[in-house]
């Protein structure tokens, strides 16, 4: 089944915080949660009817390279204002799982300039014509996909604006290939591009197992979820074979935020793994963990012990606010 993008109910509240001398953008949202990519304008304040006032001419997903176990992904979109007056628009986009926004670039007349990455609520103030900003939309619940909301102000009449969203996204290493999954854009895509170009800055890459055959890109259907892969380069291979390669990356929630999250990437080496004779189990007993996680942890521990030597010894420690042993001895 395809992943369904679900945004939090505060979608598009960003516009309420922005004031300008021209009429403010106020996108009318239907009740419930958005489940696909959308392109919207202020229909109530727009007298033009009968055609797609703002449309997405193209959509490109560009993989630039690897940083540890994360890919540098650019989503490049061309927005065209087909009317004779300035237009505001909001573009909501599905992002790959675990994506982080690292920058925004806008091109008008072939000249690229920085956009702005903002939080849930932007500070009020005047927005210059042609300015664009973006914010990350958190998933509704664990396991759902994140999204991004691109807000464009006063798009030039009969003009085209390119927007490049710069992301860091986790990737998998399957055999000798990196893998990245791109989500589908949904079934109803009014005003959005009719196809999606996938580009990898590598001589050879695959989309759903199909090689690029020397071409710089492959065209995919936007409603489909696709798997992009490319070869592991010689310099990315471990210099010294180890049983297990571990890399830790900490990601703060935002500037000045007190918390964050971390990702731990584990990669098996080419040597035979050493079977330990002693294991220390660390168990989270805090109330923030769901009961299902406890059952899954027990199953994982049972499978681990079944695969280890019979003479194995172990200790068990639990933690919430404080750590304490689970075994009396």
Image: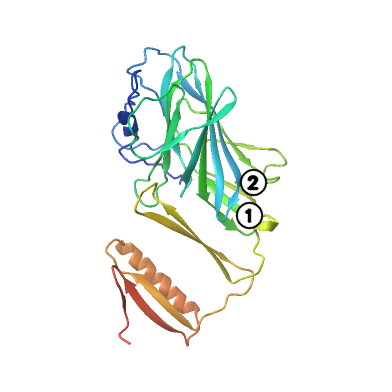
Report the mark closest to the observer, 2 or 1: 1
Residue situated furthest right in the rendering: 214
**Whole-percent x, y for residue 68 in the image:** 57, 56
* Residue at which label 1 appears: 177
**How many residues crowd around disc 2 within 10 Å: few (fewer than 14), some, or many (20 or more)?**
many
Disc 2 element: strand
**How many residues crowd around disc 1 within 10 Å: few (fewer than 14), some, or many (20 or more)?**
some
> Which quarter of the picture shows residue 280?
bottom left
Q: N-terminal of the two: label 2 or label 1?
A: 1
Along the viewing direction, whichever of 152 and 217 lies nearer the viewer: 152
Along the viewing direction, whichever of 112 and 303 lies nearer the viewer: 112
Which residue occupies 35% across, 35% down? 122
Name the quarter where the C terminus is drawn.
Answer: bottom left
> Which quarter of the picture shows residue 295?
bottom left
Q: Would residue 188 be visible to someone looking at this image? A: no
Q: Residue 5, labelled with which disc? A: none
Which residue occupies 30% across, 38% down? 9
* Residue at which label 2 appears: 206
- In the displayed structure, would residue 69 be above or below residue 315? above
Along the viewing direction, whichever of 157 and 31 lies nearer the viewer: 157
**Whole-percent x, y for residue 219 in the image:** 61, 35
Marker count (numbered): 2
- The reply to whether the C-beta atoms of the residues labelled 2 and 1 are less than 8 Å apart is yes
Disc 1 element: strand
Which residue occupies 49% across, 43% down? 102
**Whole-percent x, y for residue 116 in the image:** 45, 35
**Whole-percent x, y for residue 46 in the image:** 37, 15
């Amino acid at each position: 089944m395809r992943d369904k993008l679900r945004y939090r109910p505060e979608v598009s509240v960003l516009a309420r915080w922005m004031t300008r001398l021209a009429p403010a953008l106020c996108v009318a949202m239907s009740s419930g949660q958005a489940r696909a990519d959308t392109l919207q304008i202020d229909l109530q304040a727009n007298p033009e009817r009968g055609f797609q006032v703002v449309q997405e001419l193209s959509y490109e997903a560009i993989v630039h390279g690897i940083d540890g176990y994360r890919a540098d992904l650019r989503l490049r979109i061309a927005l065209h204002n087909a009317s004779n007056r300035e237009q505001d628009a909001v573009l909501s986009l599905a992002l790959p799982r675990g994506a982080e926004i690292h920058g925004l670039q806008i091109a008008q007349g072939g000249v690229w300039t920085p956009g702005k990455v903002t939080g849930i609520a932007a500070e009020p103030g005047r927005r210059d014509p042609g300015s664009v900003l973006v914010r990350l939309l958190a998933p509704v619940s664990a396991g759902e996909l994140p999204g991004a909301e691109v807000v464009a102000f006063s798009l030039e009449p009969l003009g085209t604006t390119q927007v490049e969203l710069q992301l860091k996204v986790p990737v998998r290493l399957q055999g000798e290939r990196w893998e990245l999954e791109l989500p589908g854009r949904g079934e109803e895509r009014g005003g959005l591009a009719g196809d999606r170009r996938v580009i990898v800055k590598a001589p050879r890459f695959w989309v759903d197992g199909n090689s690029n055959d020397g071409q710089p890109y492959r065209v995919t259907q936007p409603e489909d979820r696709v798997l992009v892969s490319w070869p592991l380069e010689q310099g990315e291979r471990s210099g010294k074979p180890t049983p297990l390669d571990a890399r830790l990356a900490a990601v703060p929630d935002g500037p000045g935020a007190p918390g964050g999250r971390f990702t731990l990437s584990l990669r098996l080496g080419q040597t035979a793994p050493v079977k330990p004779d002693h294991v220390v189990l660390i168990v989270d007993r805090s109330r923030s963990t769901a009961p299902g996680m406890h059952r899954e942890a027990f199953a994982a521990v049972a499978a681990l012990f079944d695969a280890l030597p019979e003479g194995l010894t172990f200790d068990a420690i639990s933690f919430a606010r404080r750590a304490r042993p689970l075994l009396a001895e």
